[in-house]
Amino acid sequence: MSLPTPPRHREIFSVVGLDLERAGQVSTEVQRILRRLGVEPEVVRRAGIVCFEGEMNIVLYTPGGRIILLVYDDRVELIFSDQGPGIPDVELARQPGYSTAPEWARELGFGSGMGIPNMEANSDRLEIRSRVGEGTVIRATLFRRKGEAAGNSGKAGA
Amino acid sequence: MRLREVAELVGARFLAGEDLADREVRAGFAADLLSDVLAMVREEGVLLITGMVTAQVVRVAEVMNLAGVLFVRGKLPAKPTVEYAASAGIPLLATLHTMYEVCGILYNHGLPPAKRKPLPHENEPPHPAPP
Amino acid sequence: MRLREIAEKLGLEFLVATDPEAEVRGGYVSDLLSDVLAHAQAGDLWITHQRHLNVVAVGKLRAVSGVVFARGLRPGPETLRRAEEEGVNLLVSPSDAFETAGRLHRLLFP
């Protein structure tokens, strides 16, 4: 058995809970890094969307957490971890429209119950591990389909 | 339609990115919920028409590569948000019209709606895992 | 123009039709309940992507002529039940809010 290939690039960001002024910053930074590494535009776009939703989940619902970006030859991974309240029913959270968002989050334009479904729609694999009272870890994997991606953004996300 | 024409049609002024007034707007999308923007907009070069003036709107515009953001009903984002948009090259416009009026004016002057992106639950079955 | 006629012309489907003859005086597009509470006018047809149960209460308070869920988004059974009780017309549009509003605008102000 061969050892797993190490990532070409690894970056760790910390996310502060309830810091709405900076929320979204990691996502734009992740896109900049991916672009610089020559990752396909379509993957950059999807990664930005996935990261934004994951980042907002951490900012809105937890005291804080971190986001790890791993770039491989064949895929991009984003790992979101937090010490928040946890998700009691992960399958329910995967359903579009299901939301536990407080009114203030809705008035900020979030909490329409599209966060996790949106992450799912824009990644090729989304693993969620959550324990109530301890926190949540979400790993999103986006495969780099080099053949079909060139210059045609947004196609595989749908 | 160019941003400049959008501004003229709806009586909007540029808050940021006036130097990009000749940028082409391919379609319009009206929403306040940012998750909906992220979930529903599939193409680039879309003008977001919104009443949401938080800092995240500009981040979303950046992430989605939008043509610009048009704030309605006279709502204005905070100064740091405008400054960030200017530095990130995201044009911001503001009008006193309501979202309904802006949609009416732009749609009836030929700005097409943003292309439909299926929502997750409309996508059956979900993505097959690549080999 | 009556809501029934608008629904026919724009291809809107009634989910709850408590008063299809309601007069539509204008339109309002927003996904924020607080914004609708503050600014929508009586008789407006409210077009939204919002699916929260409270749209019914807000629509009722502002006396809108109906609520149109854009993009084919259908609210849950609880919302439909409450709309029946409160007497709020609910409709669904296959188009997004931008296009639905654009076409309504053309219809009301040709």
Image: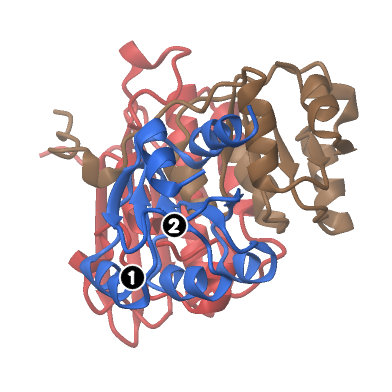
Chain colours: A red, B brown, C blue
Q: Residue C26 or C56: which is nearer the viewer?
A: C26
Q: Which amino acid does label 2 sit on?
A: Val
Is mark 1 in CB contact (under 8 Å) with mark 2? yes
In this view, A8 is above or below A22 = above
* Rendered location of residue A27, percent (x, y): 57, 48
Q: What residue type is labelled 1?
A: Ala
Q: Residue C64 carries which label?
A: none
Residue B131 can be seen, yes or no: yes
**Left or right of A119, for residue A109:** right
Cα separation, mark 1 vs mark 2, equals 10 Å
In this view, B128 is above or below C88 = above
Q: Residue B8 or B17: which is nearer the viewer?
A: B8
Q: Which chain carries label 2?
A: C
Q: In which quarter of the image is the N terminus of chain B?
A: top right
Q: Is mark 1 on a helix, strand or loop?
A: helix
Q: Residue A121 or B30: which is nearer the viewer?
A: B30
Q: In which quarter of the image is the C terminus of chain B?
A: top left
Q: Mark 1 lies on which chain?
A: C
Q: Residue furthest bottom?
A: A133
* Rendered location of residue C1, percent (x, y): 52, 43
* Rendered location of residue A137, percent (x, y): 34, 66
Q: Residue C67 carries which label?
A: 2
Residue assigned mark 1: C83
**Left or right of B34, for residue B74:** right
Check if mark 1 and mark 2 are on a common chain: yes
